[in-house]
Image: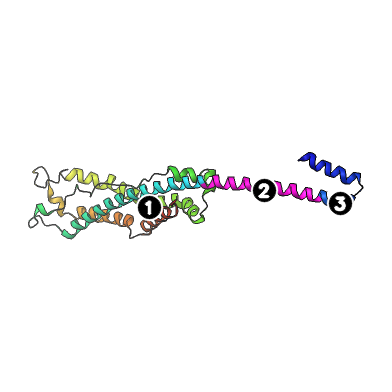
Amino acid sequence: MINFFKKIRQKFIAKNKFNQYLLYAIGEIILVMVGILLALQVSNWNQQRVASNKEKILLSELHQEFIENKEQFKLVVSNHQLAFDICDKWIAMFPIDLKTVNLDSLPIRTDGLHKRWTFNPSQGIVNSLVSTSSFELISNRELRKLLVSWNDVLLDFQEDELHSKKYVMEVLNPFINKHFHYKANYSDPRLNISILESAEFENLILQRKEYLIDILGIGYELSRIQKTIDRIIELSNPD
């Protein structure tokens, strides 16, 4: 093909047809440029196809990670709610009068009141995306924004959980271990259950409820993290 074009050029030159040669030369240049542009376009198509396939894989992995995180979150929140409900059962009986109260009607204190839970989601995929060049493969701008802000949203929620956990470990659990039987056996003669009538016990339960209110929401963090998880799941759905 190169020899063919070369012979045509030599023919124009030999016949001293400069104008025709100039037009031919321009046409040849245009033809070469078109060939280069087509090659670049094909290369761009291939790169876009590869990037699109990688994005689908990343989205699928991210989608699955946040589906699992949502299930864990629901379980953690349900346990916080359980402790909250137990607090309400105790509070409804205040002030407790041991002369009239039926001990069998007392809430089972070991069933969630003094336990603590924290939401610790899997972060492998989201961290690998945000901290590497793979993040550029995510084409949805809203999803990119949610992934960047995810860690801050999570920390805001966990902060309330950690405050509650600290209260349980440092205040509530020592009190319970000192004054109550692990199996909630209020008839154990070794116990002085008159502590149930004290303002100290009432304050412990009321404070426990306050920490749970911070977690459960009537605050901003719970709603925000729920919406963030649901939206990431929606936007990362590869289908």
Q: Quadrant of residue 5?
A: top right
Q: Kindly identify which residue carries mark 1.
A: 157
8 sits to left or right of 45: right
170 sits to left or right of 57: left
Please name the residue shown 26% across and 56% down the image.
209
Q: Is residue 117 magenta?
A: no
Query: Which of the two residues, 140 or 95, is positioned nearer the viewer here?
Result: 140
Please name the residue shown 8% across and 46% down the image.
187
Comes first in the chain, label 1 or label 3:
3
Q: Give the alpha-carbon distance from disc 2 to disc 3, as whole Å.
A: 27 Å
Query: Which of the two residues, 213 or 121, is positioned nearer the viewer here?
Result: 121
Q: Give the alpha-carbon distance from disc 1 to disc 3, as whole Å.
A: 77 Å
Residue 163 placed where, x, y %? 34, 50
Query: Which of the two residues, 234 or 53, is positioned nearer the viewer here?
Result: 53
Q: Kindly identify which residue carries mark 2.
A: 38
Dot 2 surroundings within 10 Å: few (below 14), some, or many (20 or more)?
few
Query: Which residues lie in the magenta part?
Result: 26-52
